[in-house]
Image (tube, coloured by chain):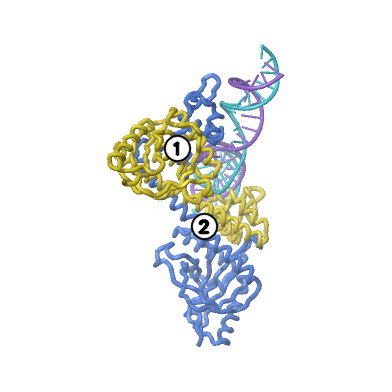
Chain colours: A blue, B yellow, C purple, D cyan
Amino acid sequence: MNRLRIGQMATMNYVTVQTLRHYDQIGLLEPANVDEETGYRYYDIRQSAKLDMIQYLKSMGMSLDKIREKFDKQDAQVIRATLKEHQAWLKDKIQEYQLMHNAVDRCIYNLDRYLRTSRTGKINLQQLPERKIFCHDSGIDIYQHSIDTYEVILRQLKQQVILQHVPMVYFCNVGSIVRYQDLLSGRFVSTEIFVFMDAGLIPDDQMETVPAGDYLCAYCNAFEEEVACAKGMFEEADREGYQITGDYLCEVVTELPLFRQEERNMFIKLQVRVKKT
Amino acid sequence: MNRLRIGQMATMNYVTVQTLRHYDQIGLLEPANVDEETGYRYYDIRQSAKLDMIQYLKSMGMSLDKIREKFDKQDAQVIRATLKEHQAWLKDKIQEYQLMHNAVDRCIYNLDRYLRTSRTGKINLQQLPERKIFCHDSGIDIYQHSIDTYEVILRQLKQQVILQHVPMVYFCNVGSIVRYQDLLSGRFVSTEIFVFMDAGLIPDDQMETVPAGDYLCAYCNAFEEEVACAKGMFEEADREGYQITGDYLCEVVTELPLFRQEERNMFIKLQVRVKKT
DNA sequence: CTTGACTCTATGGTTACCATAGACTTTATA
DNA sequence: TATAAAGTCTATGGTAACCATAGAGTCAAG
C-alpha cells in the first residue's frame, strides 16, 4: 500500500495524473520515492492526508503558492493569521460579485425600459425616489459643442470616478444637469455632468442629493434630439399647470454601441422636478 | 480629436497601452485607422464609447470573448438573454464564495478549539445541536486495522462525497461511528465513516440526522489514543450516573499535516449521547 | 539634426492545470 | 517467452487578460 503508482494515487483521490505531476513539479507534494532509473513516481497512501489538505485549502479559494507557504511555516498562529487574511479576501470577493450582480440587474432593467419605451417621445409624470450623484464641472457648456467635446468631458468624469475607486459598473449611468437658477433665467446651459451612485460608495460630502418627488419625464433616442424634446416638455408643463421647482437632469439610461457600432447610441431620459400649481 | 495616438487614448481612458494593443490583437476594439508604413495605431475619440462598454461589461465579470460575441450579435433579445445567463453565473459565484467563507470560518473555529484544548483529555458534558451526516459503510472495522486501511476507506468516502457534488471543504470534518446496538452488546466496532454536512446540500434521504441533546465529550490527539480515551469516557459515564442513549461518534475536528509532515495528525473529539439516570 | 518621448513587434511571464507527441516501462495475455 | 495493451515519462503548447522587457523604428520640439 505504500508503493502506489501515480495512476492509482490519482484515481483513489479523484485527481488527475497531471495534477499530481504538477504538484510534484512545483514542490507542493513530492512522491514518497522516485525510481532513479525509470523516473517512475511512487506514492505512499498516507500522503493522501496532505493531498486532502491541499484540496481542502484549495476549495477555500487559496492559491497553490499560498498553500505551500502554509506547509513551510509550521506555526499555528501564523496559519491562523493567514486564514483570517484569506477570509477578509473572500469577503471582498463576495462584495465584488454582489456589486456585479446588482449592476447586471440594473443593466437588464434599463434594457427592458429601452425595449418597451423605444421610439416614443411621450411626456409623463413619475414619482422618483431620492438619488445620489457625483458631479464633475468641466466649465464647458456641452450644448454649445459637438459630441467630441462631450466625449472629452466624459473622459474627465471617468478619471474622477476611477480615482474615487468606484467600479466602472457605475459609469454606465451618467447624465448632465441644468441648474434651477439657469432654468429660471431662461439659460439652457450645462457645464456639469454626473454619475449616479449608491449611498456609501464614497464619502457623503463628495456626493450631491437629488431629492425625491414628482418629476416630469420624457425619453428620447439621441443626443441631438434632446434640446427639442426638453423644450416640448417645458411647454407641456406650462399647459398642464406644473411649476418647475428644481434642476433639470438628462439621464443616459442605456447606451448600446452594440447596435450602431463605434459610436455612442444613447437612450436618454429627461426629467425635471415639478409641482402642481 | 480623431487622430489620437495609442498613448493619448490610453491615458484619456485610464487603461494601459498594452490593453489597447491587446484589444486590437483579439479584434475586440480596432483603431480607427493604422498607418500602413509605420504600423502606428490611431484612434477616434468616439471609440471611447465602445471602450466604455467593454470596461462596463468587464466590470460585470464578463470575459472578453463573451463581450466580443455580444458586439457581434446585435439583437437586443439575445443580449438580454446573455445578461440573464451571466446573472445566474454571478449568483453561483456568490454562493460558491459564500461557501468558501463559511468553510474558513469553521476552519478557524476548529483551529481555535484545538489551540485551546490542545493536550488535555478531560471529559465534559456538552449540549450539541442537531447535525446532518453523510455515511459510508465499508464493511471493515477500522479498529481492527491500521491507519493505512483507514486511509483507503477515507478515499472511498471521498469519492462518494465528490460524486454527490459536495465541495471538498466539507471533507475536513469527517468521523467514524459506533452504533448504539453494538455499544449495548459491548462491541466497539465501526464499519461506517461519515462527513458532516449542511442541510440542503444533498437530498435529505441521503443524509442521516444526529439528534440534538446532551453529549459526553472528550478530546484526544491521536488515532491510537482513541480507544483508551473512549473507555475512560464510558467509565466516567458510569461513575457519574449517565446512561448512554445513542451512537458513539468520533469526530475529526481538525487535522494538520501542516505540523507533522506527510502523515495525518488528528485532533479528535469523542462524543456519545447520554441522559442522567 | 539631434534628443527624448513615443510606438512598434516579439517574446516570456503570470495560475492551475489539460492535451498532445514520442519514447519508454510495466503488466497481462497468448 | 514474445507481444500487445496499458501505464508512465519528459517536453511542449494551450488556456485569460494582460504586464514587462528588449531592440528597433518614429515623431515632435529645440
Q: Residue furthest left?
A: B239
Residue A24 image position (x, y, % from top left) = 50, 31
Q: Give the image quarter of residue B85.
A: bottom right
What residue would you read off at disc 2? A100
Which disc, if any, is residue B139? none
Using the image, name the chain to which the residue with label 2 belongs: A
Residue A150 image position (x, y, % from top left) = 56, 67
Circle 1 packing at 10 Å, graded few (<14), some (14-19), many (20+), is many
Number of on-image labels = 2
What residue would you read off at disc 1? A53
Q: Is residue A243 depicted above or below A134 in this figure?
A: below
Circle 2 packing at 10 Å, graded few (<14), some (14-19), many (20+), is many
Q: Is residue A190 visible?
A: yes
Q: Is residue B250 depicted above or below C25 in this figure?
A: below
Q: Is residue A209 depicted above or below B243 in this figure?
A: below
Residue A214 image position (x, y, % from top left) = 51, 79
Kindly report the distance in space between the C-alpha atoms of the residues bearing marks 2 and 1. 32 Å
Residue C3 image position (x, y, % from top left) = 49, 46
Q: Earlier in the sequence, mark 2 or mark 1?
A: 1
Q: Check if mark 2 and mark 1 are on a common chain.
A: yes
Using the image, name the chain to which the residue with label 1 belongs: A
Q: Is residue B29 visible?
A: no
